[in-house]
Image: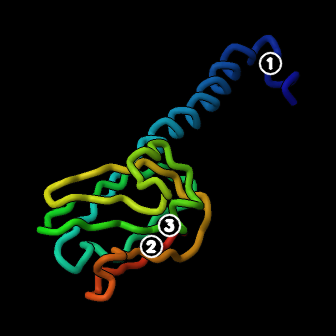
C-alpha cells in the first residue's frame, strides 16, 4: 500500500497529507495534556462541591481553598494512592490528605489511574457532615 502511495506522480502530495495526518494527533495530545483545574472550597463542616468527577488518564490540578476559621483536611486516601501525583510534597507525610490552615490554598497535580468511587472526608469534621464522594470514570 505504501509503495502505491509514494509512486512518482502522487508521492509528494500524498506524503504531505500523511505528514499532516500524523502531526494532528500529536497536536491534539498537547492540548489534552494541559491539566484541567477543579476547585474545592472548604468552610466549616462542608466541601463545596462535595461530589467530584474525574476521568481516568486525564491530568488535573485540584485547587483546594480553606475559607473557614479552622484547619481542614481534604482526605481522599484511596484516590491519591491510585493516582500519579506530580507534586506529592503538598500532601501530608502519609500521602493521604492535604492539610490547610484557615485562609490557605494548595494545588495538587495528579492523573487518576483507576476508575471507581472514592471517599472524601475531613477527618476532624466528618461527624459534622464534612464528607463527599469522588468518582473516576
Which SS class for mark 2? Answer: strand
In this view, the residue in front, 5 or 108, is 108
Asked whether, in this view, residue 64 is left or right of residue 96, the answer is left
Q: Position of residue 126 (x, y in %)?
A: 33, 83
Q: Residue at x 87, y 30 (%)?
A: 1
**Cα distance in 3D space between marks 1 and 2:** 51 Å
In this view, the residue in front, 64 or 114, is 64
In this view, the residue in front, 108 or 100, is 100
Q: Are marks 1 and 2 in contact (CB under 8 Å)?
A: no
Which SS class for mark 1? Answer: loop
Asked whether, in this view, residue 12 is left or right of residue 109, the answer is right
Asked whether, in this view, residue 51 is left or right of residue 93, the answer is left
Sequence-wise, which precedes: disc 1 or disc 3?
Answer: 1
Q: Are marks 3 and 2 in contact (CB under 8 Å)?
A: no
Q: Residue at x 42, y 52 (%)?
A: 60
| Mark 1 lies on residue | 6
Q: State which quarter of the image contains the C terminus.
A: bottom right
Mark 1: few/some/many CA within 10 Å (<14, 14-19, 20+):
some
Task: Check residue 134 in the rendering and tell me which mark sits there, or answer none.
Answer: 2
Q: Position of residue 136 (x, y in %)?
A: 52, 68
Would you place residue 137 above or below residue 30 in this image?
below
| Mark 3 lies on residue | 77
Q: Nearer the viewer, mark 1 or mark 3?
A: 3
Mark 3: few/some/many CA within 10 Å (<14, 14-19, 20+):
some
Would you place residue 80 above or below residue 13 in this image?
below
Q: Position of residue 23 (x, y in %)?
A: 58, 28
Q: Residue at x 53, y 77 (%)?
A: 117
Sequence-wise, which precedes: disc 3 or disc 2?
Answer: 3
Total number of numbered discs in the rendering: 3
Amino acid at each position: 500500500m505504501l509503495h502505491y502511495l509514494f509512486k512518482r506522480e502522487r508521492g509528494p502530495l500524498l506524503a504531505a497529507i500523511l505528514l499532516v495526518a500524523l502531526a494532528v494527533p500529536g497536536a491534539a495530545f498537547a492540548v489534552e495534556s494541559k491539566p484541567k483545574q477543579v476547585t474545592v472550597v472548604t468552610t466549616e463542616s462542608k466541601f463545596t462541591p462535595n461530589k467530584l468527577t474525574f476521568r481516568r488518564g486525564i491530568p488535573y490540578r485540584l485547587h483546594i481553598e480553606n475559607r473557614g476559621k479552622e484547619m481542614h483536611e481534604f482526605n481522599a486516601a484511596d484516590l491519591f494512592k491510585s493516582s500519579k501525583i506530580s507534586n506529592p510534597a503538598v500532601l501530608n507525610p502519609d500521602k493521604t490528605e492535604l492539610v490547610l490552615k484557615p485562609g490557605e490554598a494548595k494545588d495538587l497535580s495528579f492523573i487518576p489511574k483507576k476508575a471507581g468511587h472514592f471517599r472524601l472526608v475531613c477527618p476532624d469534621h466528618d461527624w459534622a457532615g464534612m464528607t463527599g464522594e469522588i468518582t473516576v470514570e
